[in-house]
């Protein structure tokens, strides 16, 4: 049977149909409408065009297991809506729906950089810090759909210079996302170096040998390693896969394994860290695989 994947993003919606063998049968991208009703209608229209098959949908945010209402999406008008219910009504089929970072994780674990590994911890490091956990090819979503939300685990072992911890939009303080993300890098650089420049510019300056930019990147790496070592205490991943905008930074990935080892419980754990293989198509391919 064919598998249809939909990836809802802030600016575009991607659709794909994969054959049973994994070949792409259909692909289409449309702009994301500006209203909730528009988004539901656009996704239903894409599924009709995509043909017969199972439907998996990836979107920012997640469904509350208690209420069935969508929450924590940066596409704000989707929050508080019975998103999956409305999509199933509009499409006329049962759908599987997951957080977009979970779809990225599934795609990387099945035929990406995490292929062949048992426990795959996936990070998408961009404006925010998304995460996903795949064990033996199966996405782990957990009892409340909150497994793999690495961005909202606490920054482990904060040092004196990191107090007071920063507030997060989720209502708590000290979430990893506030530190390990492009936004976090930018804010940290402003706080320490006094320069209000983009994370991209910080990376560019670090490559030119700018001492302040290099120091900011080193603080980011150190925090990233602490987050990863903390995850290792729970599931000890066979591989950490890093995607998202900061994935463009090979230095970040190369420097992480010894740092993670240093922060690991034994102090000597061997950590494998790789960059994501699939680019932006990873989300829609992972969504199609939600029925695997
Ligand atoms: Zn948070």
Image (spheres, helix red, strand yellow):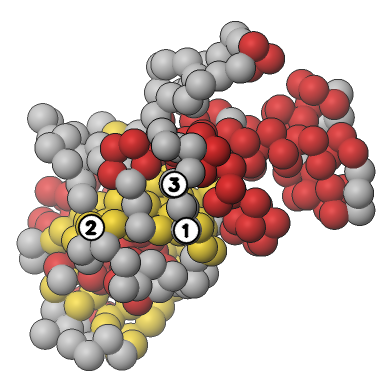
Q: Nearer the viewer, mark 3 or mark 2?
A: 3
Q: Residue at x 15, y 71 (%)?
A: 292
Dot 1: element = loop
Is there a contact, CB below 8 Å, between mark 3 and mark 2? no
Closer to the camera in the image, 36 or 84 = 84
Q: In the rendered view, would you say 177 is above or below 30? A: above
Question: Could you say which quadrant of the image residue 87 lies in?
Answer: bottom left
Q: Which residue is mark 3?
A: 269
Q: Residue at x 26, y 32 (%)?
A: 80
Q: Residue at x 14, y 61 (%)?
A: 95
- Gap in angstroms between the C-alphas marked 3 and 1: 10 Å
Q: Earlier in the sequence, mark 2 or mark 1?
A: 2
Q: Earlier in the sequence, mark 3 or mark 2?
A: 2
- Does residue 149 appear anywhere in the picture? no
* Residue 135: mark: 2
Residue 266 drawn at (x, y percent): 42, 37
Q: Residue at x 14, y 79 (%)?
A: 53
Q: Which residue is mark 1?
A: 272
Please give the count of numbered marks on the rendered protein: 3
Residue 90 drawn at (x, y percent): 16, 59
Q: Quadrant of the N terminus?
A: bottom left
- Gap in angstroms between the C-alphas marked 3 and 2: 20 Å
Ligand 1 within 8 Å of the CB at mark 2: no
Q: In the rendered view, would you say 265 is above or below 58? A: above
Residue 127 drawn at (x, y percent): 58, 43
Q: Nearer the viewer, mark 2 or mark 1?
A: 1
- Does residue 220 appear anywhere in the picture? yes
Dot 2: element = strand
Q: Nearer the viewer, mark 3 or mark 1?
A: 3
């Amino acid at each position: 049977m064919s598998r249809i994947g939909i990836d809802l993003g802030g600016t575009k919606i991607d659709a794909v149909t994969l054959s049973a063998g994994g070949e792409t049968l259909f692909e289409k991208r449309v702009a994301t409408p500006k209203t909730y009703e528009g988004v539901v209608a656009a996704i239903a229209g894409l599924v009709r065009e995509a043909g017969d098959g199972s439907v998996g949908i990836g979107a920012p945010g997640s469904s509350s297991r208690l209420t069935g209402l969508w929450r924590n999406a940066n596409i704000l008008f989707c929050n508080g809506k019975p998103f999956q219910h409305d999509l199933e009504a509009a499409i006329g089929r049962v759908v599987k729906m997951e957080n977009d970072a979970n779809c990225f994780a599934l795609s990387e674990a099945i035929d990406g950089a995490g292929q062949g590994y048992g426990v795959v911890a996936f990070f998408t490091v961009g404006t925010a810090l998304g995460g996903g956990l795949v064990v033996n090819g199966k996405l782990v979503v957990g009892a409340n759909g909150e497994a793999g939300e690495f961005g909202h685990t606490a920054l482990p072992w904060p040092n004196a210079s990191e107090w007071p911890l920063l507030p997060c939009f989720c209502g708590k303080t000290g979430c990893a996302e506030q530190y390990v993300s492009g936004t976090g890098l930018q804010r940290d650089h402003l706080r320490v170096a006094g320069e209000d420049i983009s994370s991209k510019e910080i990376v560019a300056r670090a490559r030119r040998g700018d001492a302040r930019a290099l120091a900011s990147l080193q603080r980011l790496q150190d925090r990233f390693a602490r987050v990863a070592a903390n995850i290792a205490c729970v599931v000890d991943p066979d591989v950490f896969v890093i995607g998202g905008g900061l994935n463009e930074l090979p230095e970040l990935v190369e420097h992480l394994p010894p740092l993670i080892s240093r922060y690991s419980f034994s102090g000597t754990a061997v950590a494998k860290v790789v960059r994501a293989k699939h680019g932006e198509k990873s989300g829609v391919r992972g969504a199609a695989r939600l029925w695997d």
